[in-house]
Image (tube, coloured by chain):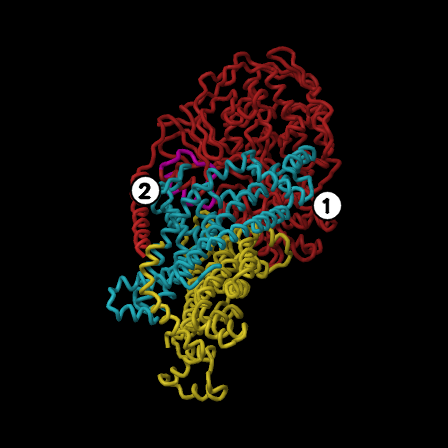
Chain colours: A yellow, B cyan, C red
Amino acid sequence: MPESHVRSHPEEPPAFDGASAAPAAGGLGVGPVEDLVVGDGSGRRATGRRRRPKARGLWADAWHDLRRNPIFGLSALLIIFLLLVSVWPGLIASRDPLACDLSRSLDGPAPGHWFGFDAQGCDVYTRTVYGARASIAVAVCATLGTALIGGVLGGLAGFFGGWADGVLSRITDVFFGIPMVLGGLVFLAMTEAEGIWPVVWVIVLLGWPQAARIARGSVITVRQNDYVQAARALGAGTTRMLVKHVLPNAVAPVIVVMTIALGTYVALEATLSFLGIGLQPPTVSWGVAISDASDGMQFRNAPHILLYPAAALSVTVLAFIMLGDAVRDALDPKLR
Amino acid sequence: MGRYVIRRLLQTVPVFIGTTFLIFVMVYALGDPVAGLFGDRAPDPGTAARLREEFGLDKPLWQQYLLYLGKIFTGDFGTAFNGRPVTELMATAFPATVRLMLIALVIEMVIGVLLGVVSGLRRGRGIDTSVLLLTLLVISVPTFVTGATLQFLLGVKWPLVNPAVSTRATFGELLLPGLVLALVSLAYIARLTRTSVAENARADYVRTAVAKGLPRHRVVTHHLLRNSLIPVITFLGTDIGSLMAGALVTERIFNIQGVGYHLYQGVLRQNSPTVVGFVTILVLVFLAANLLVDLLYAVLDPRIRYA
Amino acid sequence: MRTATRFTGAVVAVVVLATATAACGGGAAGSGESGVVRASWGDPQHPLEPANTNEVQGGKVLDMIFRGLKRYDPRTGRAVNAVAESIETDDQQNFTVTLEKGWEFSDGTPVTAKSFVDAWNYGALVTNNQVNSYFFQYIEGYDDVHPAKEGAKPTARTMSGLTVKDDHTFTVKLGQKFSQWPETLGYNAYAPLPESFFTDREAWLRKPVGNGPYKVDSYTRGQSMKLSRNENYSGEDKARNEGVELKVYTDTNTAYTDLQAGNLDVADDIPASQLKNAERDLDGRYVNQPAGILQTLTFPLYRKEWQGEDARRIRQGLSMAIDRERITERIYHGTRIPATDLTSPVLGAEGGYTEGLCGRTCAYDPKRARRLIEEAGGLPGGSVTLTSNVDTGSHRQWLDAVCNSVNNALGDNDACKVRPVGTFADYRRDIAAKEMKGMFRAGWQMDYPLIQNFLQPLYYTDASSNDSGYSSEKFDGLVDRANAAEGPEAVETFREAQKVVLRDLPAIPLWYQNGTAGYSERVKGVRLNAFSVPVFTDIEVA
């Protein structure tokens, strides 16, 4: 490594200066001025001016960009639809998800049951619709919890460095060591609560170290940038620097990882249920449906029992990945 | 740098104590392992008491822990309930798992970064959408389905490989399990690289490099990629742990008695020597990986320095 | 940055290399050594000692390398003499055992009366930590070597009831009358042990030596065991193949896939949900035959709400609400058979199995079920839980199916709730601590094919597996009488005792569990014994 280091150095300094110049503009509020020239929304200019003419600020800017983004609109619509279905599954499914007739076990599509029947003879369509609630609730809550705890702890560790980083990172390491099965068994054996919350907590408990490492790495890179150093030199307070300069620039990798994690948490919920420590009947969820379908490769005979819950999960993950992309784009000043 | 490394190595000690104690308490909290040894019968009190004594379960928790720690330093990791020394289990499990992890790591690094760069440079085009769809597929179909299906297709339908990995667990045999194991992480890496590349592709230094007339591939590998890799490296660092400890499902499907498998057995049988022993080694691996990642930050971005 | 390029190069090289080795290493399925049966195995839970093995995987090996005084005929399930020439008694309590001459261990040492007596004393002694010690509890002097109290020291090292007369004769005195005792002696715990076991146990465990139809050639713990035919075997059931190679699999599904790929000849314990595939995949090369396993739902009679006549009728109602036919057909594809008594078909009619003894109680009748439960005041607390561990076996499916069946019959989706427990140990602990609140799964795999084994350990007052806390003077009295009686009279009295249990219904019979196995085109004559272990000696390799 050393030799290549020496050789590549001469070309790099200008490159890095340039790299930091662009975000510096956005971070310091110079960006919006530049933006005003190219920008088109007049109402936006007005709102920006009404509050504080000097800089509307990165967050307001991001929100404005977001609204214009068709991908955001699409993903928002999808998510609203999914949320509606989660709250009122009766809107699009008229049957009782718990009404099962074993004699129709694994039967294919039939009139009125276009998605066929699962191993217990329950209607796959109804179960998929009703499964949205628990699956989305677990995934969203666990993702938010993980991102929040991991993001804050990892971000602080990366920002302050030194012994704070040492302590926080080593605590993260300790939690990293807990095997999923053990954590799940212990936690769920100790809590008597029913419903989704124990599962959410287990996932957060096991998931936050990863989010923390990602956030920390990201903040460490951002911290070095000239605009952060400049803000510090200008006497910006720690909180202000974190919220205004570090957070928006460091959040991208966390968003990317969390949108994917959202999907994998449904799979994790399935694994936990499979081990008897996740969601329990009569709670209906996609994860449970997927793990049931996999038991003894039943999907070889009846692919439909795997297909529909997996498809529903795909659509949900897609919606959140698109949302994450849009948010990230909106926060990136270089894209303006 | 040297002092930083030494400091980090010293920090290993509290993490080691913290983790082993935490795991010890957790296994202890699971309850009495002896109850499960007698099949569907109530254990006869005499034998059960003897077994508890043999495994040291009759002592208070802190005493068990100290005894265990003391033995670890003499290289004695205790025995699993079937009478095999834990070190013997480790000697077969870790090599297999490390091989499996390396294969998965290489696959996700090479393919993941490649897909990420391509889709990041061609945002919104067909290739980008294909990669997104692939990501969705990998996330929504869990490992136990892809694993069992690929095993059936490649092992039975078109017999290209042996469905079950032999006890030697050679690199060749582990290729398919490694691919299955890598799939989900592949999705993460492709998305992370894509975002990073897309973000940096507009950076001034890239424009400068292009303006200087550097060939395209040189711009991509030397300027763009180097600056986009930090989140990817961070992720890989965290992934080593989950690839080793979390390979349970893959290991079970492909008949690999690796770390995940033994951890699972240890937890189910509530055998603290197995669980704590394996986790201890794993934590050392995490710590090394994390240190390496932190040092790589400084290599990739020379402005990051450690004092 | 040239190092990076070099690194990429190295990575590509590794991948190419790996692909190449995979192409060479994999592919054509190995065909195995000629005459050797390749069979699936699971890692035994305990060290492979006869009195320390209480599960099928360890039992599989013991069955091959040991022969006790008796063995169970795989076809009829009857106990027939193996090493024993005769076991005689006048009073159902004092037995004289005479050994057949000429039996040898595979290391060449003779099997003597001492081999048995020493092995049994070893198995019974509490300080040897043998999980099957209780098998010797009927022998006089057991309490001295194995005090029941926790932490108590043994006052003797050998049981006073065992006396060696000469090389081929020993006598046994039981603590009480037990007419069917000789029939229990086919169980692995009663196997003889060679001198080498007592001189160097560690070495013996690394490579066990026995007197069975096979001998161990090599044993890699956790991975595989190679056995070859014991040419000096004196029994009648000589091996019809050259040997057996047992391979440990992490999962029965994997073993099944490996069987399809031609890497395995016998895979037992095919997961039920694979059975639908098996008909197609294996072209009929699978067996599905009764084993001595009964699944029941047991009730915590130690709780107030499950005591009394009303609770009994509720249990009866719950039993009638379970559609056993449909569940065994749809979930288990015929690998379970609806139970109509508390024993097993492997006993045969003369052994005490009585089809239909449970009568209407075990027949699906949702209307009557609902009426019975309503008349008895409804389920205690309005609903009932169904508890089982879910870490072993695929219990999830039938738990859901049973609860759905009950809910459908009662017209209430909240009537029955599944309550899974994460680990088997935790589940057994809850049962032992009498912390069950509703129905719970109780699987019973027989130790020996006797009706006594299906009743006494489970329902006798304070018996070792009496998980429900059931106690009936009438039942206990009948069991005592049956143990003192001889032959058919004993069986008949046990049947009477069973009727008492079925009326009080501390447990609902669910289904008899079958053993399953698939096999390759290379082998024939694959069948399972009553313990769902393949009869390896009968397998012929083409």
> From the viewer's perspective, is residue C22 above or below residue B108?
above
Distance from label 2 to label 1 (Cα)? 60 Å
> From the viewer's perspective, is residue A55 above or below residue A171?
below
Pick whichever of labels 2 and 1 is earlier in the sequence.
2
The residue identified by callout 1 is C302
Q: Is residue C223 visible?
A: yes
Residue C142 horizontal side relative to residue B275, left or right: right
Magenta stretch contains residue C281: yes
Disc 2 is attached to a residue of which chain? C
Tell me, for residue A166, which label it has, or none.
none
Q: Is residue A320 visible?
A: no
Q: Position of residue A43 (x, y in %)?
A: 43, 88
Under mark 2, the amino acid is Ala
> From the viewer's perspective, is residue C520 above or below residue C423?
above
Residue B36 placement: quadrant: top right
Residues packed near mark 2 inside 10 Å, few (<14), some (14 to 19) or many (20 plus): many
SS for dot 1: loop
Q: Identify which residue, B80 or C525, lies in the foreground.
A: B80
Q: Identify which residue, A108 or C48, lies in the foreground.
A: C48
Callout 2 touching callout 1 (CB < 8 Å)? no
Q: Position of residue A259 (x, y in %)?
A: 45, 64
The residue identified by callout 2 is C22
SS for dot 2: helix
In this picture, which residue range is highlighted in magenta? C262-283
Disc 1 is attached to a residue of which chain? C
